[in-house]
Image: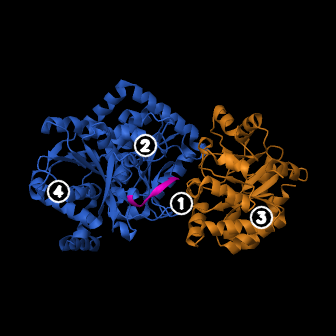
């Protein structure tokens, strides 16, 4: 199935999803990018170089940790987690940006731009740009700038220019539109480091390619640790890059159930969520065809999630295809159970998960107790939660933290 | 009369035609109507009616806000087509639908073309739909006598230009430069090469747009292209100087076409 996935008649299509829906002005640039990516893929030294960089700069391979306390508490399947939170900059985003960074070096462009939701991809891109000596501009929805100030601080320290986007809903999708507008004017000198498996071809394929290092490592690690492949793999799905990364290398192992967990927000019935594969319909926007959260006239609707990184209208076209093929099962988790899941992991395992990743955990916590004890779950812990300190503290309602903030403000 | 013939005929009376733009629902349908009346008075030849969309990714800040505000004003698909129907009935200029692909995709290609035909639009411009994704839109366009207007860009390779232009109809929309709508374009020799590349490949009339704002811009295009497109600059005038400023601006543009 994995091989066929990239061999549809029309390049960049996955069943009816994907494609390249862009203004004509960017056509040549995307064609050049497809070519540069194909050349890099065909060059065996490129992947080796990528793995080396990830090892020396981003702590790869990241470990697989057995969650023994959580397993005992839930009393069902044995739970393991892939520690993408231990990447440099604290999330799987590093994989994609370092890969694209190496490609930018090959293409010889001096500037990169990026969109960011939670800020993880922005920070990762800014880090890569600093390391590779590239100029960097990051577009970020104004709402997200407010939610994720610490990441904005670090991007600026890393030398990136952060531009708040006030259009539309002032979140991730609007940041993507703005990055596209920049790119349409600057493509000769600039590469757009798209942060997820969305957008026009070749981004879904290219980002999946770099992120598949997660699944490749996990495949070997699980065999080594447990003697076999896991029965279930869980990953949260915003655009879908960490999920694609861990799922794809297991695609042909039909015995492994793949579970994507979208943002249920305040509940699917409330309309305030980002569960595209439960409330969405096929559409075309932001350069590609996929399931979008839109109204019956094709206008995008407002999404909601406690996790900025999942708060997005679309989902990777590869995942839409795998959803239709029923190869990936999609679930959602609501804000409240996500916060509870984060708290539980912090308390029981001493691991602080990102709120995005906590969606996958929430589904595991819900489903693991119903499984047999000899079943094995692997959950992708896509990022660490330090960045969410303000949101988690607010959700927990920690009085001492509030006092600390008040004092800080008073002392300004 | 088909669109190309209409253009050729109008060209017998003036040096260059003028195509202008309205985001339907912004500032309001009433204001839009006033704009169209002024366009009629000034002798505008073609008008793009933009169907508002939540993700106008090829537009600059002014049109982005206009799209957003139009939707906030409650403009829905029916309002859009109703406005189109009234406008085509009332005015002499030809009217084209302009907008992003998703509302068309969701509506269905057949239904979309039927609506345009019913409301007497002469064609459509979908800037985020590349030629290879048109599918049966070409077929339905023929059936309903619509001209799908294709956009080509100065960054296009000669092969790509040929590929795009092979499917052209009505006229060709040539984007004068990189970037999005609304930023001022300095016309210089850099456009000439692009225009002559298009001219070599296609017999269709050429329209140049993106960043044209003043009468002087249009004068410079005499003898180079058949149609000058002015969009954001006019809306900017409306915002800055009200209906009178708009009319004044429009009159100046129209004069420079003579």
Which residue matches tag 2? Answer: A204
Query: Which part of the image, by quadrant, shows the C terminus of chain B?
Result: bottom right
Q: Quadrant of residue B157?
A: top right
Residue at the spot 48% in from the left edge and 58% down from the top edge = A174
Q: Which mark is residue A174?
A: none
Crowding around mark 1 (Cα neighbors within 10 Å: few <14, some 14 to 19, many 20+) is: many
Mark 1 vs mark 4, foreground winner is 4
* Distance CA(mark 2)–CA(mark 3): 42 Å
Chain A: what color? blue
Front residue of B111/A212: it is: B111
Q: Residues within 10 Å of mark 4 (few under 14, many from 20)?
A: few
- What residue does disc 1 label? A298
Q: CA distance from mark 2 to mark 4?
A: 34 Å
Q: Which residue is found at the position 79% from the left and 54% from the top?
A: B216
Residue A279, magenta (yes or no): yes
- Residue A337 is drawn in which quadrant? bottom left
Q: Which residues are magenta?
A: A278-284
User: Are the residues under marks 2 and 4 on the same chain?
Assistant: yes
Earlier in the chain: of badge 2 and badge 4, it is 2
In space, the residues marked 1 and 4 are separated at their CA atoms by 39 Å
Say which colour chain B has.
Answer: orange
Taking B209 as reference, is A387 left or right?
left
């Amino acid at each position: 199935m994995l091989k066929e996935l990239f061999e549809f008649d029309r390049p960049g299509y996955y069943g009816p999803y994907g494609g390249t829906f862009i203004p004509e002005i960017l056509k040549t640039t995307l064609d050049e990018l497809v070519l540069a990516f194909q050349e890099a893929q065909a060059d065996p030294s490129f992947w080796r170089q990528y793995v080396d960089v990830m090892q020396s700069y981003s702590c790869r391979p990241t470990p697989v940790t057995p969650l023994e306390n959580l397993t005992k508490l839930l009393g069902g399947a044995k739970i393991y987690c892939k520690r993408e939170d231990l990447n440099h900059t604290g999330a799987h985003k590093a994989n994609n940006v370092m890969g694209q960074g190496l490609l930018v070096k090959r293409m010889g462009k001096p500037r990169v731009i990026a969109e960011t939701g939670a800020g993880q991809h922005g920070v990762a891109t800014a880090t890569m740009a600093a390391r590779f000596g590239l100029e960097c501009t990051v577009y970020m929805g104004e709402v997200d700038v407010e939610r994720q100030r610490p990441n904005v601080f670090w991007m600026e320290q890393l030398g990136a220019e952060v531009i708040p986007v006030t259009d539309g809903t002032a979140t991730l999708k609007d940041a993507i539109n703005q990055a596209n507008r920049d790119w349409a004017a600057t493509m000769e000198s600039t590469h757009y480091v798209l942060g997820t498996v969305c957008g026009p071809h070749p981004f879904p394929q290219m980002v999946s390619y770099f992120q598949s290092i997660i699944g490749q490592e996990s495949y070997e690690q699980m065999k080594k640790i447990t003697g076999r492949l896991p029965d279930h793999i869980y990953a949260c799905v915003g655009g879908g890059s960490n999920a694609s990364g861990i799922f794809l290398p297991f695609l042909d192992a039909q015995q492994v159930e793949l579970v994507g967990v979208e943002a249920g927000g305040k509940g699917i019935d409330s309309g305030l969520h980002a569960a595209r594969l439960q409330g969405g319909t096929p559409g075309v926007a932001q350069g590609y065809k996929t399931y979008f959260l839109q109204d019956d006239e094709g206008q995008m609707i407002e999404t909601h999630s406690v996790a900025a990184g999942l708060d997005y209208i679309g989902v990777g076209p590869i995942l839409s295809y795998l959803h239709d093929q029923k190869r990936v099962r999609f679930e959602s988790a609501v804000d409240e159970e996500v916060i509870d899941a984060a708290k539980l992991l912090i308390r029981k395992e001493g691991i602080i998960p990102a709120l995005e990743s906590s969606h996958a955990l929430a589904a595991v916590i819900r489903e693991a107790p119903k499984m047999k004890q000899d079943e094995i779950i692997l959950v992708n812990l896509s990022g660490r939660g330090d960045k969410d300190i303000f949101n988690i503290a607010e959700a927990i309602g920690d009085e001492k933290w509030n006092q600390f903030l008040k004092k800080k403000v008073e002392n300004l | 009369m088909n669109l190309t013939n209409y253009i050729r005929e109008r060209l017998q009376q003036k040096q260059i035609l003028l195509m202008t733009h309205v985001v339907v629902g912004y500032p309001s349908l009433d204001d839009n109507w006033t704009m169209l009346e002024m366009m009629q008075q000034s002798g505008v030849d073609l008008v793009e009616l933009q169907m508002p969309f939540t993700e106008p990714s090829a537009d600059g800040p002014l049109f982005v806000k206009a799209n957003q505000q139009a939707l906030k004003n409650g403009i829905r698909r029916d309002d859009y087509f109703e406005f189109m129907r009234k406008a085509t009935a009332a005015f002499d200029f030809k009217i084209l639908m302009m907008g992003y692909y998703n509302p068309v995709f969701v509506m269905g290609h057949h239904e979309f073309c039927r609506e345009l035909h019913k409301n007497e639009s002469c064609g459509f411009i979908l800037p985020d739909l590349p030629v290879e994704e048109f599918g049966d839109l070409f077929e339905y366009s023929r059936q309903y006598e619509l001209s799908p207007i294709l956009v080509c860009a100065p960054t296009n390779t000669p092969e790509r230009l040929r590929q795009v232009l092979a499917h052209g109809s009505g006229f060709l929309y040539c984007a004068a430069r990189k970037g999005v709508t609304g930023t001022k374009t300095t016309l210089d020799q850099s456009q000439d090469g692009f225009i002559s590349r298009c001219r070599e490949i296609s017999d269709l009339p050429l329209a140049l747009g993106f960043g044209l704002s003043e009468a002087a811009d249009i004068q410079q295009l005499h003898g180079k292209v058949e149609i000058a497109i002015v969009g954001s600059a006019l809306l900017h005038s409306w915002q800055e100087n009200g209906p009178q400023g708009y009319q004044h601006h429009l009159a100046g543009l129209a004069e420079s076409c003579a």
